[in-house]
Amino acid sequence: MGIFKTYDIRGIYGSEIDTDTAYKIGRAFARFLNSPSYMAGYDARLHSKEMYDAVIEGLLDEGRDVTGIGLCSTPLLHFSQIKGGFGGGIMVTASHNPPEYHGFKLYDGIGGSVSYTKGLKEIEEIAASGFGKPAVKKGTLSERVTIDEYVDFIAEQAAEADYNQKIVIDPSNGSSGMVYKLLSEKLNLNISFINEKPDGNFPNHSPNPLKEESSKQIAAAVKKTGADFGAIFDGDGDRVLFVDERGERIENYFISALIAEQLLKKSPGSAIVYDLISSRVLPERITEDGGKPVISRVGYTFVYDAMVAEHAIFGSETSGHVYFKVSDSYYTESAAYAVIMLLNLLNKKKEKLSALIAPMAAKYYQSEEINIRIEDKEKALLTVENYFKGARISRLDGIGVGFDDVWFNIRASNTEPVLRIRLEGRDRKTVNEKRDLILKMLGTSE
């Protein structure tokens, strides 16, 4: 598969991906999607601007018109592309990967991710086959600033004219800092910023907020400033991790339960999509709040497509991605939207965030994700399925096994010989016993 991954394109700059690759991807994307208009943006990585210029040149040489919005977050690009009615979107980013990586996220005309099964495979083949001469009539390039429009959209979600909460925001030296600066000014928010300056070296911590070391700074800043919560974003601003007033990390499925509660009050009975490695707490809370929980495979493509199919008002991934319905035909991913939803909730409830999370976190015991290296992943999954054939079995994504007191999922990595194991149950002892049994069955102790 090379640099063409399950959901996007990424590789180490210089040895796996460069401006020549970017140009070819631009031309191949134009031929695959066959749309006359595209929008493009780039993140804060060291070579993103030159990769952006090269991919645009490829689109132009195929006779396609391109609107560039420059340095931006992925949610800003996604929002601007769909609202503007562009047939395709391309974000130059390697998301939460380490600094040496570069890449692209591609979107179709309805904002759906162009994944490997939905087009990246064909784009890879087109890029490898060669192009010949450029189109007779080259496309046109225009530049547009869309950040104010996006900030206005986020600000419209504010339920209050005045917020008393203190927040710490950490854009991880990525490309989303300006969104929160402008939002803070527009809503007069009390925000303390750390690592807000874009810097492709990511000098202060990894651009992946899910890494435990990445949240140490924001945890300390929240406690030092007496903030009500903190939010840390990945390199391109589409993944968010929240910490409470104590600086404690919060799983996204608990935050999503709080967001779902608010949205369902406005749209009772609506569908909400969640990924299958979420805590069972989330679908239970959706049902209690009068919503329809819809389970999805893990990954942007699956969650977003399930939202569109179910006309869902909200979608959530355990990895920190959140998606919102804007209109009957318009869905967008937005971490900033989630920040405002959380502010609305705290302003109304008048409780500490930790107090709102505690009952959910205490209901079941969740293990940390376990990753084990296994070459024959499918054989291992069949072994598990056969052993637990008396339980409730799901093959939605890997193997899901359910008992009354414990449930777990084992799924294969799309990019390496690894199985990922998630367990949850009614108590630690039961979960740990099942974990040890699975690991023994697969011939490892981790």
Image (cartoon, rainbow, N blue to C red):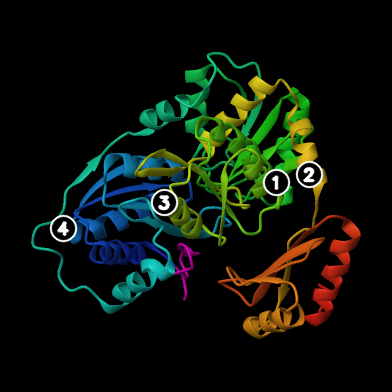
Callout 2: SS: helix
| Range shown magenta | 1-16
Q: Residue at x 47, y 76 (%)?
A: 1
Query: In the image, what residue occupies the spot 18% across and 61% down?
Result: 62
Cα–Cα gap, marks 1 and 4 = 45 Å
Q: Label 1, secondary structure: give it.
A: loop
Badge 3 crowding class, 10 Å Cα cut-off, few under 14, some 14 to 19, many 20 or more, is: some
Checking the image for residue 251, the label placed there is 1
Give the side of residue 70 with respect to residue 185, left or right: left
In magenta stretch: residue 10:
yes
Horizontal side of 143 relative to 185 (left or right) equals left
Dot 3 or dot 2: first in sequence order is 3
Q: Nearer the viewer, mark 2 or mark 4?
A: 2
Q: Residue furthest top?
A: 162
In terms of depth relative to the viewer, which is nearer, 228 or 213?
228
Check residue 215 for magenta coloring. Answer: no
Residue type pointed to by label 1: Glu
Q: Quadrant of residue 436?
A: bottom right
Quarter where residue 390 is shown: bottom right
The three-letter amino acid code for the residue at tag 3 is Val
Residues tagged 2 and 4 counted as in contact (Cβ below 8 A) = no
Q: Element under label 4?
A: loop
Q: Could you tell me residue 94's position as x and y percent?
A: 49, 56
Q: Earlier in the sequence, mark 1 or mark 4?
A: 4
The answer to whether mark 1 and mark 2 are in CB contact below 8 A is yes
Q: CA distance from mark 1 to mark 2?
A: 9 Å
Q: CA distance from mark 4 to mark 3?
A: 31 Å
Is the residue marked by circle 2 packed among few (<14), some (14-19), or many (20+) residues within 10 Å? Answer: some
Residue type, numbered disc 2: Ala
Residue hosting label 4: 63
Q: Residue at x 84, y 69 (%)?
A: 434
